[in-house]
Amino acid sequence: MKIGIEAQRIFRANKHGMDYVVLQEILQLQQIDKENEYFVFVKPGPDRCVQESSNVHIVEISMPTYPLWEQWALPRAARKTGVQLLHCTSNTAPIGCRIPLVLTLHDIIFLEPRDKRNRSLYQNMGWLYRRLVVPRVLPHCRRIITVSNFERQNIVSKLHMPEERMAMIYNGYNEWFRVLSDTGNTYKKYIDQKGYIFFLGNTDPKKNTERTLVAYAHYLERSAVKRPLLMADLDRQYLNDIISRNHIEHIREHLHMPGYIPNSDLPSIYNDAFCFLYTSLRESFGIPLLEGMACGTPVITSNTSSMPEIGGPEAILVNPENATEIADQLIRLETDEQFYNEKRAVGLQRAKLFSWKQTAEQLLALYHEVGQQA
């Protein structure tokens, strides 16, 4: 088969969740499949993280906006290359495409009530675009892939999708996320000491940054150690609003916000952390949860959506809307060495159940199945 894979944003310097998923799928398919021919459709960018090989071709498409790139330029390029199947990997796809489509629908958050406090133009425009496009493209998809059983049931229930058109394929995590005997001094780029609490928050309300910071304030009031909090990629005005609104000015001196932390530094950052907070309100999968566990770092995560499914029944699961409950677990990790070591071991074992190789093998089987039906 000639298989097209939409990977518009993988060449950009600052990648995020869906970019890493499709990047790893492509790299694994390039290793395990020498029979099919792949055309990877990307927007030009500085990080050429996929190299062409005998059966993997890079097709760069320049277009000023995402909608034009996806709705006009992508199907045009796919037709020109003669692909027999087009896999769109980031929740949306071209509405008028006549090539058999496979869509990865990571989540349907766009159907859920929008938090009116979210002032991010980028996030709000993306939400609106998905609301307009996804219902129109789903009838044309041969298969809809999602990344957890939680999200699969959510899609079937809310979009009334036939079970036979759905597929669930777990994400993996990169093999360099592991216990490191020597992390060097990577942490010094971002914070002046090891043993910090690590949190990947941003301005998206689902990331639960506000309640997590309130929980951290409770932790500081109760802790004899008072570990600093390392937070990546958070807008300072957004932080100031949270601190003012919740009257938690005392946390400011303990916060370290260095901005974007590249993926290459994250293994060391996880390893040198005392624990990792992954207290989102909602996740369709949650790759950072696996990354933290694979590095031997105890993870406090939420008892909502997919996180119990990915973290497993022995994970540290909390109500993400209860700041006191989050703080309780931070204090327990700090004061109960046996509990700390147990949760570290649980995470290491759980992470072994997931890999990008397994993801790619299941994806390749699905391509063959759809190709036979075309």
Image (tube, helix red, strand yellow):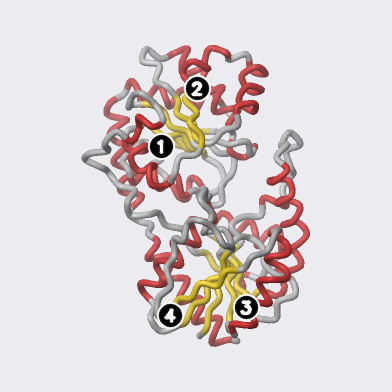
Find the residue positioned furthest to the left.
181
* Eye-nearest disc, 4 or 2: 4
Q: Residue at x 36, y 56 (%)?
A: 353
State the separation of the CA atoms marked 3 and 4.
16 Å
State the separation of the CA atoms marked 3 and 2.
49 Å
Per the image, label 2 sits on a secondary structure element best described as helix
The part of the image, by quadrant, that contains residue 84 is: bottom right
Per the image, label 1 sits on a secondary structure element best described as strand
* Disc nearer the start of the sequence (4/2): 4
State the separation of the CA atoms marked 3 and 1.
42 Å
* Disc nearer the start of the sequence (2/1): 2
Quadrant location of the C terminus in the rendered image: bottom right
* Eye-nearest disc, 1 or 4: 4
Answer yes or no: do the residues labelled 3 and 1 have beta carbons within 8 Å? no
Answer yes or no: do the residues labelled 1 and 4 have beta carbons within 8 Å? no
In the image, residue 88 above or below residue 293:
below
Q: Amino acid at mark 1?
A: Val
State the separation of the CA atoms marked 1 and 4.
40 Å
State the separation of the CA atoms marked 2 and 1.
15 Å
Q: Residue at x 51, y 72 (%)?
A: 58
* Disc nearer the start of the sequence (3/4): 4
In the image, residue 175 lies at what x, y percent?
33, 54
**What residue is disc 2 on?**
216
Q: Residue at x 52, y 64 (%)?
A: 168
**What residue is disc 1 on?**
299
Query: Residue 55, which numbered label?
Result: 4
Q: Is residue 164 visible?
A: no
In the image, residue 126 lies at what x, y percent?
70, 51
Q: Tell me if mark 2 has few (under 14), some (14-19) or many (20+) residues whose alpha carbon lies within 10 angstroms of its own.
A: many
From the viewer's perspective, tell me whether residue 115 is left or right of residue 312: right
Answer yes or no: do the residues labelled 3 and 4 have beta carbons within 8 Å? no
Query: Residue 78, which numbered label?
Result: 3
